[in-house]
Each structure stands twice: as structure tokens, then as C-alpha cells.
Amino acid sequence: MLLVRSKRACRPNRTWATTLAVVAALVVAGASSRPLVAAEPRATLGVPRASGVGDGSSKSGDVRYRGPEAGTALSTPMPFPVRPTRTSTARPRRLPPVAPEEPQAPADHANRLPAPARAWELIRPGDVLPPAPAAPATPARPRRLPEVAPQAPRGPSSASSPSRFAEPPPVHPGDFQPTPLPAGSDRYDPAAQQYVYDAKRDVPTQRPIYECGIPFYSGGMMPRGGTLLGETHLTHPAFYVYGDYRVGAASGRNAIGRVDNVAHRLNLDMDLRLTATERFHAFIGPFNRAAQFSQVRFVDGSVEYDPNFNLNPVTAFFEGDAGAILGGIDGTPSPFELPFSVGLVPLLFQNGIWMEDAVTGAAMALPARHSRLLDWSNFDLTGFAIADQLNSPAFGNDAHAGQALGTAIFIEAYDGYIEAGYAYVHDRIGLGRSYHNMTASYTRRYFDRVNNSVRVIVNAGQDLPSDQRTADGGLLLVESSLATADSLRILPYLNLFVGWDRPQSVARAGVSGGILRNVGINFEPDGLNGHPTLDATANNTLGGAIGIDLLGAALDRQWIIETAYVATHRSAAGRIARGDQWGLASRYQFPLSHRTLLRFDVLYGVRENDTDLYGGRMEFRWKF
């Protein structure tokens, strides 16, 4: 029997399918009849995270929370939708407390509710919490800012521009340039630039021949000083002995006669330092008496030794600062600056032209002052009094005949330097040689190329006949040099002078030469062998010197070549120069070490109505 399965038997039972659909609908209906709870959205803007049970009236995005901000109406809906989820019978989770913010008092105090039992209980819309007790507020005093003066705009600006800042200055093509390259190189080498610093080393220096206490050269911190002179004026005692030794050989003819000798000289400085501003200082030259040095002379084939041993001090003085001393006594910082020196004091003004001598007396200064009224950026005022040991041709060879009282000032102003001074020189013997000595100078650079100094010295007031006066007339001195492209190594110079009658410095030591010493090496004495010079008195003469000063590539050697001319004028009465003079001189010196050097000098001078001058010398110098 052929059994054939009908198509109806292969279809699913519709009754069974209907039953399953009804059961699924009931399950879904039962699930939807349970209460819903809002999900826990994250809090924003300081609102704590939600954790509570909602009611059926809550809508998505309108869930409100109660946090620690007591008294604040939490009526702002959440800024994000809340997706409803099933709830559980577990106890709601509590979040940790959040630091309270500043309380804000509600506008309506009538509808306050009592504080709930739970801090994180869900609050219905419109609920107001009681405010938390707040500390009494203290009104803050408004802070006043300092007034700022209006400033002018730094660049071009336009009134129509909306910007409140000035417009930047214009930029030109030449404002910024590439890194400069060394000469003869086509690239920048950073290693060569670093080598400048890596190759640094200690510079060898000659220490004093004897030192005790604080070293003359030292590094690092100094030990704390003593308080003998006060808590604010500490003592650092130290004693040094230093100086130099010179020996030279010369041959030639000077204004006196033949010069053939070997002479030596010892300069010995002794320095006893007490504080940073106070010290005792002395200088002696044991192998010379004034300009006479211990020497071996060669005279007409014979050899003579001329000793000039002398331990008398050339200088011996105490110097300090009155302000520092008074501050130490009072226990306060220095109330003012008043440096002073007293004793056998060396005085040097205007590069030794107006004064260069060691005199018995005192000096004090007002340093580093300025004047807005006179437009002086800096000036120093010095006063001095000379009681004895004044050396001057005005008093012949008598160093005890003259006294002086004067002042000197140095001023930085008007694009240059001004030096001025006045001294009354008194003849204590009463021979009528007292006079007034005045000076003034101005130094500056012109056109960034020419360095110039104009100096004048005037003597007046001697109560003697004109032919017997020893200090009268004046001197005009003009010194100039040219700043070349290599001004550190090549320095051409031209110095001119005009002297009338008998101009004198206030005081000049015998070894300092004449008043024209700084005009050039043709007028400068060597201070050892008696090397010849042209007439340096400016006694009714005029002239000058022109030369060039050359220094080595490492600034370690010097060569000077110079020619000078002296012309006579006015009356010949009492004039030292008998006629015109012309000279040619040269000097070369170089170091053997950091403490020794060799120096060579040569000169030839032609003198009208007198014998010619010539000479050469060699000198060895040792610094210690």
C-alpha cells in the first residue's frame, strides 16, 4: 500500500503556535507592570551622582537630587535623558559626601521642610531645604590698584584701528643678518667658538716677595674678620712686601755731559692692611738719593763706583675712610664716604703734569658724586694741604721752603672729562716766591676717531721783578691720538705745547722730569741711567712730538718711534734752551716672563747753539 504524506501533515500546528504567542504576550505584560527606576546618571557641575527610587510621575531628564547644599532649591532638570531600568529590592547605595559649597539663602522661607532622615534621598520638584548655618560674613575691603602713568605708543598707530596696542615697528631687510663668519672661512664652526671658553687657564701672576695674613691674590670666601674696630667694620690684617728691581747700562751724552754707567735701583713697597679701607703704607728706595742712583761709572778709562744707599722713606702714610671708621664705632653701616690720607703722601694729578711728588701733608676726597643741576654724571673733589717736602723748581733745591693748600676736581660731563685745580703755593722763608697755580683740562673723542685733550696751567702772583720770578706764565698742552681700525695695536699720536715765561707744576719730584714729560719719549727721563732728553721746562718754548705706538699681536711687546721739535720764542733771559732743538727717539720692550722684561731706548738730538745729544741704553726689570 502506497502511503503518501499529505502537505497538511508537514505544516506546523496553528493552534500550538497561537498558544505560544499568548504565553509570550502574558510574560511581556507581567514584566511591564513592575515599577521602574531611573538609571544612575553621572552628576555634573558639582551635583552628586543619582542613587534613589523614583515614582511613576518622574520623567526622563527630570530627576532631582538632594546633596549637601542645604537650603538650595534643586529645581534644575538634568541636562541629559535618563533611561528607565528595572529596580531591585536592595537598599539604595549611598555616595560619599561632597565638600559643601557656599550656602545660598532661599527667597521663600515659609515652605521649608524638615531635614530628611537620609542625606541622599530623592527630592520632589519644588522642595526647599533649610539653609546651613553660615559664619557672619565680613565685608571685604576693596583693594585699590596703584595708578599707572599713561605711556606713549612705541610704534606708529592709527586712530581708526580697533586694536588697543601700538602697531609693531616696520622691519627692514637689513635688520637681521646671518651669523658672521671668521675671516678666511666659509662656514660657522661651533667647536671653535666653544674653544674660546674651554682654553681658558689661570693667568700667571707674581706674588709679593713676602705676604702674611690674607693672601694678596686669593679665591673663594674670605674668613670672617675681627670686630676690634666694630661689628660693621671688620678687620682683615695682612702685611705685604713687593716692588721691583731695575738694572740698566747706558752710554751717550746728556745735557750735563758724558753718560757711561751701569746703575741699579730697588723700589720697595711695604703695606700693612688693617681693614678693607684702612692701611699703613711706606715706600723706600735703598739704592738712590732722589735722582742719584747707585752706579758703576766709566770715566776716561777708569771705573768708579758711586754708592747712594738710603733707607729714608720716600712715602710713609696712613689712609682710610672716615665714614667706615665712624660706622664701626657706632655699630652701623658706613653713613658716608670720606677717604683721607695723612703723612708723607704721594700726590699725582692730571697724569703727573700738574703735580707728581711725595709731600708731607694730608688729603681727603668726596668721591663718586653727581649733580643734576649742572648735568654732571660723576665727579670727585679732592682737597690737600702740604706742610713740607714740596719739591719744585720755584724754590730751587730747597724742599723745605714751600707749602701749599689747594683742591682738585675730576668731572664726567658734556661728553667728556673735565679736570681742574687750584693751589696757593706759599714761600715759608719769605723771599716773595709765593704764587697761585691754576689748571683746567677737557678730554673727549671727536668723530669716533680723534682722542683729544686740551690742558692749560697758569702761574701768577709772585711779588718779584719779572727777571727774578721762578713761577709765572703758563703752559698750553694739546694731546691727540688717532683711533685706527686696529686701535689696540696701532696708535698714532700728536702732542703740541706752547709755554711762556716759567710755568711750574705745584710739586715735582726730581725723578719725575720736567713739566713736558708726557709730551713724548724725547722728553721723558728713564729714572735710572740719566738718558738724554730734550728741554722739558716749557720755558719760553713751543713745539711738539709726533709718533706711533705699536703693540704686538698678543699685546705682549711695544715699539715706539717718535720725532720731536722744540722752538724758542719770546725773551731769552733765564731761558734754559739756548736755541731750537730736534730729536728722534725709539723704544722697544718685551717680556721675558710674567715677572721680567727687557727694554731698549735710543735717542739722538740736535740742539742749536749747544752740543748735540745722543745715547742708548738697555734695562732689565724684575717685578716681585
Image (tube, rainbow, N blue to C red):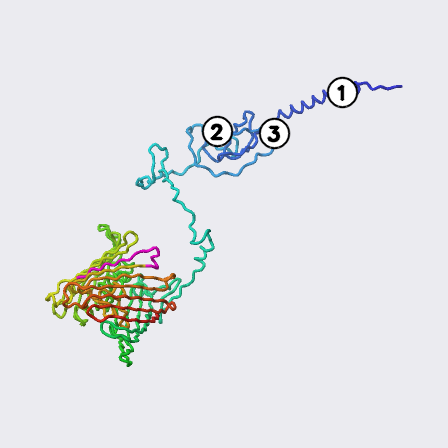
Horizontal arrangement in the rendering, residue 329 relative to residue 10 (left or right): left
* Quadrant location of the C terminus in the rendered image: bottom left
Determine the secondary structure under disc 2.
loop
Disc 1 target residue: 13
| Quadrant hosting residue 151 | top left
- Judged from this view, the residue extending furthest toward the bottom is 302
Query: For mark 3, does the 10 Å Cα neighbourhood hold few (<14), some (14 to 19), or many (20 or more) residues?
Result: few
Query: For mark 1, does the 10 Å Cα neighbourhood hold few (<14), some (14 to 19), or many (20 or more) residues?
Result: few
Amino acid type at mark 2: Thr
Determine the secondary structure under disc 3.
strand
Q: How far apart are the two marked residues, 2 and 3, measured between alpha carbons?
A: 25 Å
Horizontal arrangement in the rendering, residue 598 relative to residue 520 (left or right): right
Determine the secondary structure under disc 1.
loop
From this viewpoint, is residue 353 visible? yes
> Which portion, as a residue range, is magenta?
474-490
Give 315 or 604, whichever is nearer the viewer.
604
* Quadrant location of the N terminus in the rendered image: top right
User: Residue 491 location in percent, x, y?
Assistant: 31, 59
Disc 3 target residue: 86
Which callout, 2 or 3, points at the residue further toward the start of the chain?
2
Disc 2 target residue: 76
Q: Given this view, does label 2 or label 3 mark the residue nearer the observer? A: 2
Which callout, 1 or 3, points at the residue further toward the start of the chain?
1
Q: How far apart are the two marked residues, 2 and 1, measured between alpha carbons?
A: 57 Å
Q: Given this view, does label 2 or label 1 mark the residue nearer the observer? A: 1
Give 423 or 259, whichever is nearer the viewer.
259
Q: Is residue 278 magenta?
A: no
Q: Residue at x 26, y 76 (%)?
A: 310
